Image (cartoon, rainbow, N blue to C red):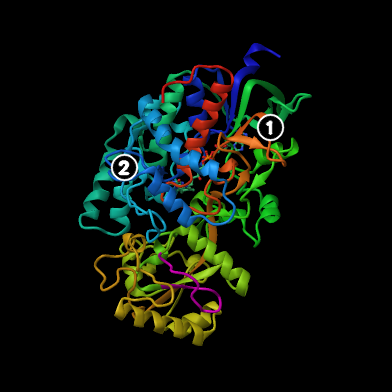
Amino acid sequence: MSEAQSYDVVVVGSGAAGAMAALRSADNGLSVLLIEKAHKFGGTSATSGGVMWIPNHGLNQEGDSREQVLDYLAAVTSGPVNPERLHAYVDEAPKMLRYLKSTGVEVMAAAWPDYFPDKPGARADRSVIAPTFDGRRLGDDRYYLMREQYNRFKLFHRYTMDLTETFSLMMQHKGWRGTAAKMITRYWTDFSTRRLSGRDRRFTQGAALMGAVFKQVFDRGIELRLETGLEELAVDASGTVTGVTVSSHGRRYDIQARHGVILAAGGFEWNQQLRDRFYPVPGMTRHSSTPEDANRGEALIAAEKIGASTEHTEEGWWIPTMTLPMPNASNFHEIHQAAFDVGRPWSVCVNRNGVRFVDEATGYDSFGQAMVRDHLATGTNMPCWLIFDAKFRRKFSAGGLMPTVHTPDRKIPADWWDHYVWRADTVEALAAKINVPVAALARTVANMNGYAKTGVDPEFGRGGNIYDRFFGDPTVTPNPNLGPIDTAPYYAVPINNGDLGTKGGIRADARARVLDGEGKPIPNLYAAGNCSGNPFGNVYPGAGGTIGPAMTFGYVAANDIAERTGNARAAE
Ligand SMILES: Cc1cc2nc3c(=O)[nH]c(=O)nc-3n(C[C@H](O)[C@H](O)[C@H](O)COP(=O)(O)OP(=O)(O)OC[C@H]3O[C@@H](n4cnc5c(N)ncnc54)[C@H](O)[C@@H]3O)c2cc1C
């Protein structure tokens, strides 16, 4: 084995978990190789909103505390959760953030209500984001090699938007046209970049976070090998992991990891067999909103082969998605997240019996859990329907269907009608068209119209808490999430149970060490991010609840290796 194929640490996967694990390992004085299966780096993390849930983060935040976070987590988690791992998250996440800042990555607090705002200990200031990042700081040969942001985070799939711009355009806030004009002008007047590439150099959201982290990775000379996928883990006679077997362009070869392998290869959302094995209800790979060429569970399969156990694998990080009819397009263009569309006024969600099953404005993961529960009970969910009227249509998007100001009905492509969107002049005619019991849908809509008048949804409490109202329409009273569905024409769009990745995976402990079937650590093997089980069990506690833990346990894994091998740990 040549020297070039031997490192102290091999990190598998270049998303948030892997990039942090590699960065921290290098700062701890260890030699690191970062391998990435895809031809682009950054993983789902680079395509994402880039929000991290870091309770008690201390950035202009007053009053949050370890105790308050633990109260909140105790109130929202149910089922088996490893308390030591949960505590490790609460203690290590703020340290990870301080370290991230110390490397030169800028971060700032973002207002966002926790997803269970009525539970004890909930707050609205635990999310952290990275400001816009100039992608060309990565170097002109690298900036287009990082994965691009998810489509809906770019205006017309081209002009990148930060979170404020996204919300302004999404809600047509005062001045939204000026905001859009500024973004377009800025893009076209960036002459030097236009000569180089069509990609907007202004990285925002997940691309901003990952761009800033990769700047640090590259500045330290950490080796990143693209198109190099993990195939197997090597183990010696004592059961200690000694390296990896990878494949690249048809060639298989071994790489030695002297002190540890950190698996950060994302979840298994693009592996239908693993979905079928783990999920209680059918869930399709094609409904996922993550990049389709990435996360197929190879790390989980390789770890299981050497005795690793798994946990919390029954669920994805759910999010309602809608699928545009776009032949020959990748899922990135077809799939539209509808997390915030489904709780807007002048609409309701029903199963195929025409019956509601959830507070539609709740957090997207809870929405998906309700879809699964309802499907298990009635067999008529997944897909379910978003029903709305002309007022909703004028102002809001329904997945890929933009509001009439951008896409009036006459501009809707012919093949979308009765495939993506259905329309009728009455609720009854719409129900007949989409094959939902007419009387049931009419009753549901009549009930919703009554709730819109009183402002109270006695069935599911829609609009009854700060999280729901955050994505409501403040111009609608008395309840910003409820408006009468009474203006023709009426529309329906089917909703699938999509995901942002998978929630469970390889079982790891508080130090991110992979555990075998007896709960004992497999020496030298670590897992972080969606590759590993969610520290919160089946719960998504707040905005950033997947990237926060991914980065934290990447950091924890790197520190454990440094401590175990007597390497000086970098300052926090
Ligand atoms: C549109 C969108 C918005 C989102 N917004 C947020 C948000 O704001 N906040 C939040 O917390 N979560 C968000 N999520 C979810 C979040 O992006 C993911 O949960 C998170 O990025 C997972 O990080 P990770 O490092 O575990 O995996 P990833 O970022 O997916 O990285 C895994 C990497 O491993 C690579 N890989 C896979 N298999 C192999 C192999 N065999 N060998 C080598 N490499 C391999 C993959 O190609 C990939 O690059 C969002 C998701 C989407 C799709």
Is residue 143 shown left or right of residue 506? left
Is residue 1 shown left or right of residue 367? right
Reply yes or no: does residue 358 show up in magenta: yes
Q: Main secondary structure of the magenta part?
A: loop
x and y, in percent, of residue 510 in the image:
55, 37
- Residue at image location 41% in from the left, 50% down from the top: 543
Query: In this rendering, is residue 565 above or below 56?
Result: above
Query: In this rendering, is residue 295 above or below 334?
Result: above
The first of marks 1 and 2 along the sequence is: 2
- Residue sitting at the far bottom: 439
Q: Which stretch appears magenta?
A: 348-361
Q: Amino acid at mark 2?
A: Ala
Please give the label number shown on residue 522: 1
66, 214: nearer the viewer? 66
Q: Amino acid at mark 1?
A: Ile
Can residue 104 be seen in this snapshot? no
115, 486: nearer the viewer? 115
Residues at circles 1 and 2 in contact by the CB criterion of under 8 Å:
no
513, 375: nearer the viewer? 513
Which mark lies nearer to you, 1 or 2?
Answer: 1
- Residue at image location 31% in from the left, 49% down from the top: 111
What element does badge 2 sit on? Answer: strand
Q: Which residue is mark 2?
A: 109
Reply yes or no: does residue 225 show up in magenta: no
- Residue at image location 52% in from the left, 49% down from the top: 536
Can residue 267 be seen in this snapshot? yes
